[in-house]
Amino acid sequence: MVEVFENERMGENRQSSKGNQLKWKNGNLWYKADYTGYEGLAEYMVSSLLAYSDLGREEYIAYRTEKIRYRQATYLGCVSENFLPEGCQLLTLERLFHNCYGESLAKRIYNLTDVKERVRFLVDQTERITGLHDFGVYICKMLTLDAFFLNEDRHTHNIAVLMDAAGDFHYCPFFDHGAALLADTTMDYPLTVDMYDCIQSVKAKTFCRDFEEQLDAAEELYGRHILFSFTWKDVADLLEKEKYYSKEIKDRVERVLMEQRRRYSYLFYHGIAENKW
């Protein structure tokens, strides 16, 4: 368990539909306390399973679970290393677009009726403002992760780029998966509700409310760029190593991943046989 203090607490400058987690920065480490359920476990599982994908290690942030003592309370949560290089700042796409055009990116996106055109608009505008190339590939990877892991909190305040001291832009590693894997047990996905009903009720937020529709649009525009290679044993081993969360929660996370593996079997290398699940 780690103890954090008031002077280490960080304000929240990115909006979230799920509210604001308590966050602290201690040296080169960031701590986040669970807010609506098992966000820390979701961060740990998603980032750990990304090691079994085509993503390079520099493309995502690794999290581990942690027990956090703050004031008189103890929280479960997670910790990660600070990924911002010296002199860099993180800019959300919503802030970036507003700074450039004085209006909301989210509103401009949803003024378009076609999902594919919404994806294309965000990609084209981001490349125009930042000078980054292949942002469509980046967005396609992100939507793949969000669809597979059921991350319901990916909106324009939760997609970002990095800007260095010289004003040059860089890709931001994938982060913030705390709303994935039905982690919100307080409001939307209580453990007493059937898991399959919960999965059916999860809605995307980036370009439309349907994960598959927005992923299909992005893949049609920019191709498919991620394959996974983890097996049921890999999932079970990761859950067994985790030492803070209850068996009931871990069992649901395992079942969610098994169901998503069934739904998105095309995202796995053919060598990962179904009987390994």
Image: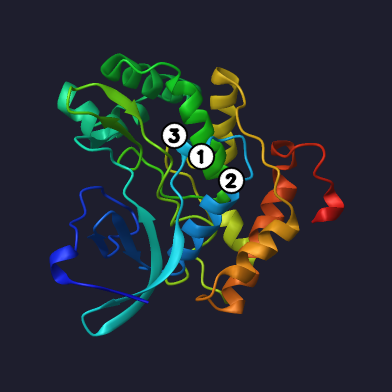
Residue flagged by tag 3: what amino acid is it?
A: Phe
Q: Earlier in the sequence, mark 1 or mark 2?
A: 2
Label drawn at residue 51: 2
Q: CA distance from mark 1 to mark 2?
A: 7 Å
* 112 or 3: nearer the viewer: 3
Q: Count neighbours of disc 2 (C-alpha within 10 A) and say few if under 14, some if 14 to 19, many if 20 or more.
A: some
Name the quadrant of the N terminus. bottom left
Q: Earlier in the sequence, mark 1 or mark 3?
A: 1
Residue flagged by tag 1: what amino acid is it?
A: Arg
Label drawn at residue 6: none
- Tell me whether circle 1 and circle 2 mark residues in contact (CB < 8 Å): yes
Q: CA distance from mark 1 to mark 3?
A: 27 Å
The residue under label 1 is 57
Percent x, y of residue 81: 36, 52
Q: Earlier in the sequence, mark 2 or mark 3?
A: 2
Nearer to us: label 2 or label 3: 2
